[in-house]
Image (spheres, rainbow, N blue to C red):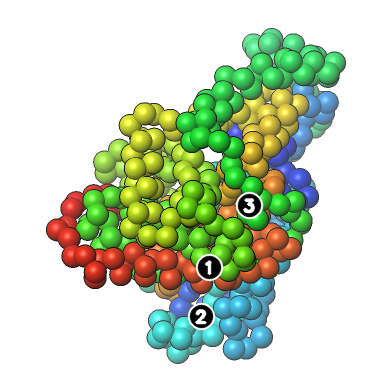
């Protein structure tokens, strides 16, 4: 029997619309080694490693009549050349040209009749101006994967399995892949009916929804949604109206910012907070300056509400990107009011730290299991309604999403090419003009800003203000030396 999509994975399919494609991405910049790094080398690497992520040779098949969630089936016509693509920047390729290309590539929806991923080798990127990398220039690899395949927490992405901890690639066993026969529509229907016999309430749910019984649907969502609503009430009012919320188009812009992890650790040590608190304070400062550059009214009480998903893990439970480890489905999401109206960077940090500790102490986080229930369960029609209900909350309860994923603090390689930087690309929710993702890697903290092309014409300005905001916090250390205090060192 084919593997059926989970409730959460299916919800990402039903959530997708033309203006909200549900694929996540990453832009990894590599130093081209002396012996080169080209398209053929990347394809060979993918062919060697794709057996580690079998989902990447499978596609989605919908069950006739929507009797059950879709299933994963092997793609008998899998063509790696379709999924691994090649692009190039006009030499010498600038960062502006790279971000423009990334924005355009991320705007394109994935083909749902094929495995839901793409990878691009982007050549022609000029050597870094700060001396990073060798004389052979740099290449970038853009990964683009639908969230139905990988949620970034509990599953492995193909961008992870191509990485090694040394320039010498690890050995992977050869595997002869033979696709399993694709099931017929009749087989999919029989499997759905067989499963429904063991869970008869699903049939009732389907009948009710087909008859337009909205109350039945609301009842399914009430338990999970109430926790989100309660969390929103603890954060106060509805999210403030800001230029961060707008009717978005199908087109995107992308911008990048790079900072040093050691700077965050200095602030953390001085003020006894977590690195993530420093990150949120930096983003608050950048948003403040950006809003003022737009002539937006910024009063002392002004705030920007961020939804901040954080991994929840035990001591020593740290995954390895190079070896395919995962965090597991342990995620807590917090609503944090970023104090953009506060002119003092130190007070902004204290306010953010207080909010994060208050959330942790009172248990106001929304766990991953709750988010799964919001996505709906078995019947696809409930998935559609539930996912859209969750998506509809976005514009009312928070202004943007900020994701912060700690990465390894040592260099990684792909077929001998050293990865210099990694910038995440987080998809936009309906009505939200920008999302911010960041990851720490090998001593750096790398921000990826994904924005609507029309609403965020100055996205690069906002990205440029990240470094300025961090410098404001560092300046407080120079003005007021303090005794170091130990905190979270992520």
What element does badge 3 sit on? loop
Q: In the image, is residue 348 above or below residue 360?
A: below
Which residue is under mark 2? 138
Residue, x 49% and y 40% (percent of image)? 335
Q: Is 421 placed left or right of 117 in the picture?
A: left
Query: Counting residues from the N terminus, which is met first, the one under dot 1 or under dot 3?
Result: 3
Q: In the image, is residue 234 above or below residue 475?
A: above
**How much space separates mark 1 and mark 3, taking CA atoms?**
18 Å
Picture coordinates of residue 384 (x, y %)?
A: 73, 31
**How much space separates mark 2 and mark 3, taking CA atoms?**
38 Å
| 255, 78: nearer the viewer | 255
Picture coordinates of residue 395 (x, y %)?
A: 65, 42
Screen quadrant of the N terminus: top right
Which residue is under mark 1? 463
Picture coordinates of residue 241 (x, y %)?
A: 64, 47
What element does badge 2 sit on? strand
Query: Counting residues from the N terminus, which is met first, the one under dot 1 or under dot 2?
Result: 2
Local crowd size for mark 2, using a 10 Å CA cut-off: few (<14), some (14–19), many (≥20) = many
Q: Is 108 placed left or right of 329 in the picture?
A: right
CB of mark 1 within 8 Å of CB of mark 2? no
Q: Is 103 placed left or right of 400 in the picture?
A: right
Question: Mark 1 against mark 2, which lies toward the viewer?
Answer: 1
What element does badge 1 sit on? helix
CB of mark 2 within 8 Å of CB of mark 3? no
Which residue is under mark 3? 242
């Amino acid at each position: 029997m084919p593997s059926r999509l989970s409730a959460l994975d299916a919800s990402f399919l039903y959530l997708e619309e033309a203006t909200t494609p549900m694929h996540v991405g990453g832009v990894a910049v590599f130093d081209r080694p002396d012996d080169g790094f080209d398209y053929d080398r990347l394809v060979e690497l993918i062919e060697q490693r794709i057996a580690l992520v079998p989902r990447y040779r499978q596609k989605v098949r919908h069950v006739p009549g929507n009797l059950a969630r879709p299933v994963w089936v092997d793609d008998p016509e899998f063509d790696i050349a379709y999924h691994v693509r090649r692009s190039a920047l006009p030499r010498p390729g600038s960062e502006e040209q790279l971000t423009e290309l990334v924005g355009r590539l991320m705007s394109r929806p994935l083909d749902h009749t094929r495995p839901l991923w793409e990878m691009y080798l982007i050549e022609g990127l000029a050597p870094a101006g700060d001396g990073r990398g060798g004389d052979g220039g740099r290449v970038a690899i853009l990964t683009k994967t639908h969230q139905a395949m990988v949620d970034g927490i509990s599953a492995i992405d193909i961008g992870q399995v191509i990485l090694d901890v040394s320039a010498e690639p690890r050995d992977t066993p050869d595997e002869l892949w033979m696709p399993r026969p694709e099931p017929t529509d009749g087989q999919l229907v029989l499997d759905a009916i067989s499963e429904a016999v063991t869970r008869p309430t699903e049939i009732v749910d389907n009948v009710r929804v087909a008859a337009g019984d909205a109350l039945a649907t609301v009842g399914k969502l009430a338990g999970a949604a109430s926790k989100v609503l309660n969390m929103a009430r603890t954060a106060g009012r509805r999210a403030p109206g800001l230029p961060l919320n707008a009717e978005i188009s199908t087109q995107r812009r992308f911008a990048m910012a790079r900072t040093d992890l050691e700077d965050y650790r200095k602030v953390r040590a001085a003020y006894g907070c977590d690195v993530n608190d420093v990150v949120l304070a930096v983003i608050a400062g950048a948003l403040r300056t950006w809003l003022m550059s737009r002539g937006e009214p910024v009063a002392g009480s002004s705030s920007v509400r961020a939804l901040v998903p954080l991994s929840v893990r035990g001591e020593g439970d740290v995954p390895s990107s190079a070896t395919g480890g995962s965090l597991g489905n342990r995620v807590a999401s917090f609503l944090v009011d970023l104090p953009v109206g506060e002119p003092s960077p130190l007070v902004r940090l204290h306010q953010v730290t207080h909010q994060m500790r208050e959330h942790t102490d009172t248990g106001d986080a929304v766990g991953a299991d709750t988010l799964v229930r919001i996505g709906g369960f078995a019947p696809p029609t409930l998935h559609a309604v539930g996912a859209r209900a969750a998506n509809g909350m976005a514009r009312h309860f928070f202004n943007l999403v900020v994701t912060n994923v700690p990465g390894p603090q040592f260099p990684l390689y792909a077929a001998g090419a050293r990865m210099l930087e990694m910038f995440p690309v987080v998809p936009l929710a309906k009505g939200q003009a920008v999302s911010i993702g960041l990851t720490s890697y090998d001593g750096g903290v790398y921000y990826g800003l994904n924005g609507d092309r029309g609403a965020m014409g100055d996205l690069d300005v906002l990205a440029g203000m990240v470094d300025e905001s961090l410098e404001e916090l560092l300046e407080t250390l120079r003005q007021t030396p303090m005794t170091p205090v130990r905190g979270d060192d992520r």
